[in-house]
Amino acid sequence: MEGQCQQIEQYRLKEMERSGREMTLDEAAFEWIERYAEAFARDYNFSID
């Protein structure tokens, strides 16, 4: 879980820099989960059910 939180915060910072828009941690988490959760789970042998 800590690894996911770190990934989400990095995603939030990069997206804000790239797009220039403000993004809450909740917004970043929602977007990150939609885009990367499956790959993260596969890479770290987690099951998403």
Image (cartoon, helix red, strand yellow):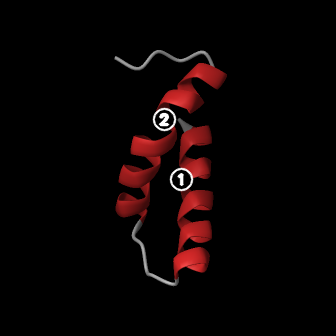
Image position of 48 with respect to 29: above or below? above
Decide which of tag 1 and tag 2 comes sooner along the chain: 1
* Secondary structure of the residue carrying numbered label 1: helix
Residue 38 point in image, percent of width and height: 49, 28
Amino acid type of disc 1? Ile
On the rendered structure, is 28 left or right of 2?
left
* Secondary structure of the residue carrying numbered label 2: helix
Image position of 33 with respect to 21: above or below? above
Mark 2 is surrounded, within 10 Å at the Cα level, by few (under 14), some (14 to 19) or many (20 or more) other residues, namely some
Image position of 31 with respect to 3: above or below? below
Residue 4 point in image, percent of width and height: 55, 41
Q: How many marks?
A: 2
Look at mark 2 in the image and give the residue it sits on.
37
Residue 31 point in image, percent of width and height: 40, 53
Amino acid type of disc 2? Ala
Q: Quadrant of residue 43?
A: top right
Residue 34 point in image, percent of width and height: 39, 43
The residue at the point 60 percent across, 49 percent down is 7
Between circles 1 and 2, the one closer to the viewer is 2
Q: Between residues 45 and 21, which one lies in front from this camera angle? A: 21
Mark number displayed over residue 36? none
Mark 1 is surrounded, within 10 Å at the Cα level, by few (under 14), some (14 to 19) or many (20 or more) other residues, namely many
Spatial CA distance of label 1 from label 2 is 10 Å
Mark number displayed over residue 8? 1
The residue at the point 61 percent across, 78 percent down is 17
Q: Quadrant of residue 18?
A: bottom right
Mark 1 and mark 2 residues within 8 Å of each other at the beta carbon: no
